Amino acid sequence: MGQAFVKENDDNELLNNVQPTVIALMRYLRKQSNGRHIYRTRLLVDDKKREIHVMSNGLSYLLNDNNEWQMVF
């Protein structure tokens, strides 16, 4: 009996599963915006010394204490 490889659907990837690099975040955001280039417009630091990446899509992101991406509200 043969085996087939099943590719997981990356379209449903969650933000917190994206690798903890800015490049990986930008790739993820590009996929989510149907190929539109997303770039960082500002870099801020919060009171816990975490970097907040303000992106061209109008949203901000940071790496939380678990080293996972999350949106900042």
Image: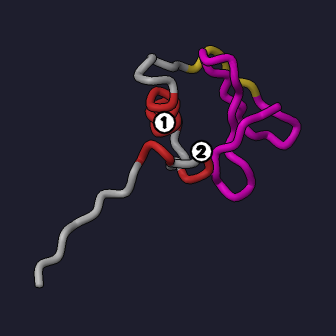
The 10 Å Cα crowd at callout 2, few under 14, some 14 to 19, many 20 or more, is some
Q: Secondary structure at mark 1?
A: helix
Q: Quadrant of the N terminus?
A: bottom left
Residue 44 horizontal/vertical position (percent): 74, 25
Q: Quadrant of the C terminus?
A: top right
Contact? badges 2 and 1 (CB < 8 Å): yes
Alpha carbons under labels 2 and 1: distance apart: 8 Å
Residue 38 horizontal/vertical position (percent): 51, 20
Residue 19 horizontal/vertical position (percent): 50, 49
Q: Secondary structure at mark 2?
A: helix
In depth, the one of 16 and 45 nearer the eye is 16
Q: Residue at x 71, y 27 (%)?
A: 60
Q: Residue furthest front?
A: 1
Q: Does residue 53 sit above or below 14 in this rendering? A: above
Q: Residue at x 49, y 30 (%)?
A: 26
Disc with the residue nearer the chain's start (2 vs 1): 2
Which colour scheme appears in the figure? Answer: secondary structure
Whether the magenta-drawn stretch holds residue 68 is answered as: yes
| Residue 69, quarter of picture | top right
How many numbered discs, if any? 2
Whether the magenta-drawn stretch holds residue 71 is answered as: yes
For badge 2, the amino acid type reads Leu
The stretch in magenta equals 45-73
- Residue 66's tag is none
Q: Does residue 45 sit above or below 16 in this rendering? A: above
Q: Does residue 69 sit above or below 55 in this rendering? A: below
For badge 1, the amino acid type reads Tyr
Instruction: Left or right? Give the position of 71 relative to 11.
Output: right
> What residue sits right under mark 1 in the picture?
28
> What residue sits right under mark 2 in the picture?
15
